[in-house]
Image: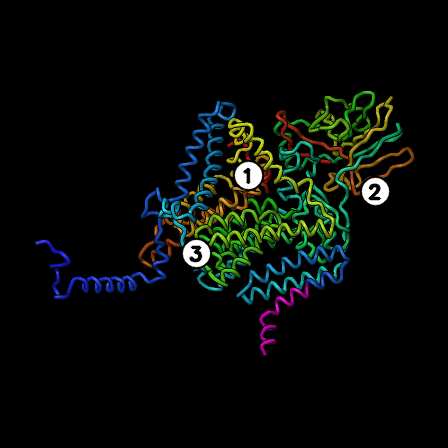
């Protein structure tokens, strides 16, 4: 009788112990080791904390069992997120990058910036300190806009070869009457070395999910297809005091 | 004729017998008029009877003011004293820091009878085990719990995904970072944008899921949080598992603060108002769906505070006391596996427990809690090959080294630190001025039992944030003070409502007055909620301050 009494009193302990043991039994050694520690510590904490509170203890034990079943029976795998930063190497004059941005004229940030007299800028992320002749040319709608140079470097850049933004002023007149802009990036004529343009994941495009494209000399491919990403080419509205009203790509 | 014990004897009895009878009569009357239960509620150490000098918090305030004044006036002037705004910022930062340090010292020193005698009003007493402001009925309790859960869920939805303030404040338009792209410091989990540090938790998640080998990362010490996430990952996916754990923590925190309120404040409304403040609180809104350990750690902090009361760790003795101490130690150690919640909890345990609980028990709780938190490091290094070093693993040690360097450079450097790392800006980033003003009012109207507890929670939470400030000013670390700040602010708001619409003796009139007081409180809470929700209309000021502190700006 006393044995039954003891089991009746301690059943949540037994249930939690069984649940943690089940998590460990179905796993590889490193996973079982990790699960065993955390499951043990959390299970003991839950039981100690609910001493004298049978309903709370039963609820906690049930939660641990449900979680354990989910953990033990789950597929166990999950996809890696797309890379937050990568670079595309332009090693050939025939290679070019193309990115389309729909002008966000209905976005309240765009309207606020325009009303406040903010200026549009193109931000292009590239590796290293670029200067003519080893630099990148940026075009807008097929017309040359600028060659990247040190005066356009923006933001922190602790190392000469680290990545960072170049900021190019964009006259309002170049945006008039357009619904979207088409930005091109190529190596400057006479460049003697490969140059890198940054890329990142794609979350909220203004135009199309595959609005970034690369021409490798033979055909066009989108980094959305290869990396679920885009090139870091952005349109921003910035006031004279540096306040950014919005950034779009 | 002068009456003396010898000659005044109307009943003819001897004076000694009269005195004995008188004492018995007085005791009998006292037992009827002030039953033991009520005597405890009278709070015999109410400072009002001992004057200002009897309160440790006020004495600490005076000492802190003196030290801050010395540091402001004796150390040579520099930019930190160049303008009135800078001077005030520096003064407040110094005062808060020295008040915290002095109060902690005085509380701990109170275990010595000599020191305890200095502050008759605040002499540590054994804590009465009671619930003074519990809900009126189970129905009301359930209704309120459901309402709070829905409010937390609504805020969680509104501030989720790309609207998560932790993520949103890293975008270029927030003005905080100049290196991030249009999406901010982000990663994509299951197709959803999430705060970028979540990426560094995925290796641990993969280990618990059986998907990856053990790989060291930035957050090896916070593995307890990732383990909880792993319990939900299979059915929900990574993004929603992290987000759901945060929501559960948010609701748990609100309910725990409600529980703490009804345990210590006689007015039921205080706990309820504080729970609403948690549900609309800046720290939880800031975290919302971010794949980070902070909401879980904040919840663990409040839950362990509830647990310390529930297992009667402040009052239990003997075997019951040992069991209570074991539960407290284990739960505190577990909080250390989520984030560094065990440090503020241990500080609270010492500051409030000194004089109530034997120093041996306090030391035992400390050693056991630290052992549990440290055991994961040994275990992980030995059996899994985790390194527990690099990146965020080393930040606390780095802060200590910076303090040593600052102190070695002399008083000027020491004072400058409070300008460069404004403690005022840190605390205002955690809770904006309205909460501090309300909490100040609440502190004035809160009686000893709740006040000393709230101050212990407050100093236990902000002391680590101040200690860490030379490395980073992180309002999210100071936000561990939310149970104390929100409960005191709630007490302040309730007191203001009572002052504006005093209770009436007539039940009919009191009914309408109660509604008026409720309306005042609702308006106050709505005003506070508007401030914490301003990010929804594009104003990131408060969320940016919560992200990186307010620095020297007022």
Task: Give SS at disc 2.
Answer: helix
Q: Main secondary structure of the magenta part?
A: helix
Q: Kindly give the residue lying farthest to the left in the view shown.
A: B1
Residue B469 drawn at (x, y percent): 57, 36
* Front position among marks 2 and 3: 3
* Quadrant (top left, top right, bottom left, bottom right) of the N terminus of chain B: bottom left
SS category of the residue bearing label 1: helix
Q: Nearer the viewer, residue B6 or B105?
A: B6
According to the image, label 1 marks what residue? B467
Callouts 2 and 1 in the same chain:
no
Asked if residue A7 lies in the magenta stretch, the reply is: yes
Colour style of the rendered protein structure: rainbow
Give the Cα distance between marks 2 and 1. 47 Å
- Report if residue B539 is visible in the image: no
Q: Nearest to the eye among marks 1 and 3: give it.
A: 1
Where does label 2 land, which residue?
A226
Q: In the image, is residue B145 above or below residue B280?
A: below
| Mark 3 closeness class: few <14, some 14–19, many ≥20 residues within 10 Å | some
- x%, y% of residue A208? 77, 40
Q: Nearer the viewer, residue B544 or B230?
A: B230
> Looking at the image, is B133 positioned above or below residue A181?
below
In the rendered structure, which segment of residues is drawn in magenta? A1-19
Q: Residue at x 66, y 46 (%)?
A: B161
In the rendered image of this protein, does residue A157 appear above or below residue B229? above
Q: Please tell me how crowded label 1 is: few (under 14), some (14-19), or many (20+) other residues with Cα within 10 Å.
A: some
Q: Nearer the viewer, residue B140 or A119?
A: B140
Name the residue tied to disc 3: B268
Magenta-drawn stretch contains B143: no
Which chain hosts label 2?
Answer: A
Q: Secondary structure at mark 3?
A: helix
């Amino acid at each position: 009788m006393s044995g039954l009494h003891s089991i009746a009193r301690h059943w949540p302990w037994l249930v939690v112990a069984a649940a943690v043991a089940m998590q460990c039994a179905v796993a590889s050694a490193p996973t079982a080791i990790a699960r065993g520690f955390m499951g043990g510590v959390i299970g003991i904490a839950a039981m100690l904390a609910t001493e004298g509170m049978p309903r709370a203890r039963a609820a906690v034990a049930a939660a641990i069992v449900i979680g354990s079943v989910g953990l033990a029976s789950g597929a166990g795998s999950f996809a890696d997120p797309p890379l937050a930063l990568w670079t595309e190497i332009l090693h050939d004059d025939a290679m070019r990058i193309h990115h389309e941005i729909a002008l966000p004229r209905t976005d309240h940030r765009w309207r606020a910036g325009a009303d406040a007299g903010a200026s549009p800028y193109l931000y292009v992320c590239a590796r290293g300190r670029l200067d003519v002749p080893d630099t990148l040319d940026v075009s807008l709608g097929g017309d040359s806009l600028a060659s990247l140079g040190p005066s356009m470097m923006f933001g922190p850049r602790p190392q000469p070869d680290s990545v960072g933004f170049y900021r190019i002023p964009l006259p309002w007149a170049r945006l008039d009457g357009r619904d979207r802009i088409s930005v091109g990036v190529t190596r400057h004529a006479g460049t003697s070395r490969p140059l890198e343009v940054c890329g990142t994941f794609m979350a909220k495009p203004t135009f199309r999910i595959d609005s970034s494209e690369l021409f490798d000399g033979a055909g066009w491919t989108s980094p959305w297809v290869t990396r679920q990403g885009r090139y870091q080419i952005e349109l921003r509205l910035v006031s004279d005091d540096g306040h950014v009203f919005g950034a779009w790509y | 004729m002068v009456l003396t014990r010898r000659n005044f004897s109307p009943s003819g009895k001897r004076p000694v017998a009269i005195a004995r009878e008188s004492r018995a009569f007085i005791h009998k009357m006292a037992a009827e008029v002030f039953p033991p239960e009520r005597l405890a509620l009278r709070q015999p150490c109410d400072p009002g009877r001992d004057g200002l000098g009897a309160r440790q918090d006020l004495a600490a305030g005076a000492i802190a003011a003196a030290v801050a004044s010395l540091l402001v006036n004796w150390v040579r002037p520099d930019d930190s004293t160049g303008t009135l705004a800078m001077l005030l910022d520096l003064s407040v930062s110094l005062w808060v820091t020295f008040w915290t340090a002095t109060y902690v010292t005085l509380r701990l020193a109170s275990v010595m009878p000599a020191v305890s005698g200095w502050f008759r009003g605040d002499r540590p007493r054994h804590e009465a085990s009671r619930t003074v402001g519990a809900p009126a009925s189970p129905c009301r309790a359930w209704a309120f719990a459901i309402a709070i859960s829905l409010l937390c869920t609504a805020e969680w939805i509104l501030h989720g995904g790309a609207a998560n303030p932790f993520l949103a404040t890293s975008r270029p338009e927030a003005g905080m970072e100049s290196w991030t792209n249009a999406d901010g410091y982000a990663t994509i989990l299951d197709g959803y944008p999430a705060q970028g540090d979540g990426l560094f938790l995925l290796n641990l998640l993969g280990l618990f899921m059986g998907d990856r080998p053990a790989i060291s990362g930035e957050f090896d010490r916070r593995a307890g949080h990732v383990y909880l996430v792993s319990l939900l990952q299979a059915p929900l996916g990574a993004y929603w598992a992290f987000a759901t754990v945060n929501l559960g923590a948010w609701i748990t925190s609100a309910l725990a603060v409600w529980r703490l309120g009804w345990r210590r404040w006689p007015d039921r409304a205080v706990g309820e108002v504080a729970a609403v403040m948690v549900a609309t609180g800046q720290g939880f809104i800031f975290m919302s769906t971010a794949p980070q350990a902070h909401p879980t750690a904040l919840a663990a902090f409040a839950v362990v505070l509830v647990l310390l009361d529930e297992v009667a760790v402040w009052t239990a003795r003997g075997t019951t006391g040992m069991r209570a101490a074991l539960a407290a130690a284990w739960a505190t150690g577990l909080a250390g596996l989520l984030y560094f919640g065990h440090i503020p909890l241990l500080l609270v345990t010492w500051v409030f427990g000194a004089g109530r609980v034997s120093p041996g028990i306090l030391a035992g709780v400390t050693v056991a809690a630290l052992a549990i938190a440290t055991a994961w490091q040994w275990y992980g290094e030995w059996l899994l090959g985790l390194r527990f070093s690099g990146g965020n693993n080393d930040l606390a040690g780095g802060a200590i080294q910076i303090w040593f360097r600052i102190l070695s450079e002399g008083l000027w450097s020491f004072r400058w630190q409070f300008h460069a790392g404004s403690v005022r800006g840190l605390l205002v980033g955690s809770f904006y001025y309205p909460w501090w003003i309300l909490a100040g009012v609440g502190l004035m109207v809160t009686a000893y039992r709740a006040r000393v507890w709230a101050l212990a929670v407050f100093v236990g939470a902000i002391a680590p944030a101040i200690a860490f400030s030379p490395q980073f000013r992180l309002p999210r670390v100071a936000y561990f003070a939310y149970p104390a700040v929100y409960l005191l602010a709630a007490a302040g708001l309730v007191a203001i409502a009572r002052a504006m619409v005093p209770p009436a003796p007539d039940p009919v009139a009191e009914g309408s007055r109660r509604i008026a007081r409720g309306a005042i409180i609702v308006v106050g809470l709505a005003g506070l909620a508007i401030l914490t929700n301003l990010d929804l209309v594009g104003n990131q000021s408060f969320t940016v301050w919560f992200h990186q502190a307010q620095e020297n700006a007022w």
